Amino acid sequence: MTDFTVALLLVVATALVLRWRRPAWYWLSFGIALAVLRVVFRYSSVMEACGLTVPPSRWRLALARIANRPVPNSRTPRILRLRPTRTGLVLRLGLRPSQDAFEVAASCDRLRHSFGMYGVTSRELRSGVVELRMTGYDVLKRVQMPARVDRTPTRVPVALREDGAVHYRDYRTVPHALTIGATESGKSVYQRNLVAELATQPVALVGIDCKQGVELFPLARRFSALADNPDTAAELLDALVSRMEAVYQLIRAEQRITADVPDAEIAADIWDLPKHLRPVPVVLLVDEVAELALFSTKEEEKRRDRIITALARLAQLGRAAGIYLEICGQRFGSELGKGITMLRAQLTGRTAHRVNDEPSANMAFGDIAPDAVLATIQISPETPGIAVAGDSSGGWGRIRTPHTSLRQAVNACNRHAHLTPNVPELAQFRPVLSPLAPVPEPAIEAAPAAA
């Protein structure tokens, strides 16, 4: 056996082991080159087999007849760009006249099989341009977030999408969101990861955790206000409504609508205000919203109506005042009483982890993306953290949050506790905590004296 044969066998064995144990490493070392070769050499035949070609134009047929040449072949979409990524390939196609983006979307499964990729998704960038995102392995099996991601005060990474892209929680685009999921579905991990990411940004975190605070109170050093029971929650929400009204008065006073000011500088929300006047944005996290809506006595019913009314007002008017809602629960349907469906209609972002029944999935996606309902009820109990994320536009996709333990989230909140803003309207709800104990320095033994 020659040295070349031995080296080749070692390379093949290494590739097989990496593909089995470390698919991400296999993709970066071997998979990219093989996938690019498959796409380049199979492109024309695959497109023709998938029905993504158009017949030659009449003038080309006429020229062929005049010149007595063979009939030209059908034309495939033009490859505008082929870019490798850390999880797959991005193929940008220019469609031919009469081709439609829906034809490409309908052929994604066949393209996945033909190109030997793990998954293929498509989206239309603009008229006549479609982007195919192809993944080389199951990126949701072991989530590894990229080292470099974009972060802003209102845009933080929270998960990885099935096409390999980072899933962001963008409050400027989607101000309010609903997250549902059964017990042990990964909903709490999603919330911890969101809090840990927001802890690094200059925002005020406000929490309502009616499970006696077991989920959010360990993270209290980064929260400007917390409530652990419905009575305190009602008062906290009233204080947030009062803050919202005060912020609107500030915007009205600073709108600058005089004739000598360009229209672009007229203020309509806090982001149009000068930085020295801009109030700090507030993110309200509600854990187990059903605990706020359930009641058994007349007094509790009055409190419940007060809470739901305040949440509905914040959902309808809070965006311009920089108040954003993150509402979590196992179910969020009309059985929780009046006002619930009105509140749900204001929650643009929807994230559904594994649920116990189809009606629970319908509560999240039935009114915006019926196809996502089937994907939600197919989530296996063996894959906690897998979720379906969508919005009111009807688009959706599978995501998975990197596992974040409660200790990791607590450490992140403690490390950035100095960023916690003091919101005067919420001062009475700020958790009172003892100062962090100093970390003892390791003892250093004195060196023995020289003889």
Image (tube, helix red, strand yellow):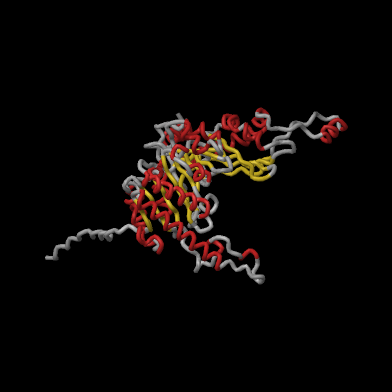
Q: Position of residue 131 (x, y in %)?
A: 62, 41
| Whether residue 237 is visible | yes
In the image, taking residue 442 as reference, residue 290 lies left or right, namely right
Q: Residue furthest front?
A: 298
In the image, taking residue 35 as reference, residue 356 lies left or right, namely left
Q: Residue at x 58, y 43 (%)?
A: 393
Taking depth in this image into account, of 196 and 341 the one nearest to the observer is: 341
Q: Quadrant of residue 74?
A: top right
| Whether residue 140 is visible | no
Q: Residue furthest right?
A: 66
Q: Quadrant of residue 421?
A: bottom left
Taking depth in this image into account, of 432 and 134 the one nearest to the observer is: 432
Q: Residue at x 38, y 51 (%)?
A: 233
Q: Is residue 338 above or below residue 48?
A: below
Q: Residue furthest bottom?
A: 260
Q: Is residue 246 above or below residue 163?
A: below
Q: How many marks?
A: 0
Quarter containing the N terminus: top left
Quarter containing the C terminus: bottom left
Q: Residue at x 85, y 34 (%)?
A: 63
Q: Position of residue 98 (x, y in %)?
A: 74, 36
Q: Quadrant of residue 435?
A: bottom left
Q: Position of residue 144 (x, y in %)?
A: 44, 44
Q: Position of residue 387 (x, y in %)?
A: 46, 38
Q: Residue at x 66, y 72 (%)?
A: 260
Taking depth in this image into account, of 284 and 20 the one nearest to the observer is: 284
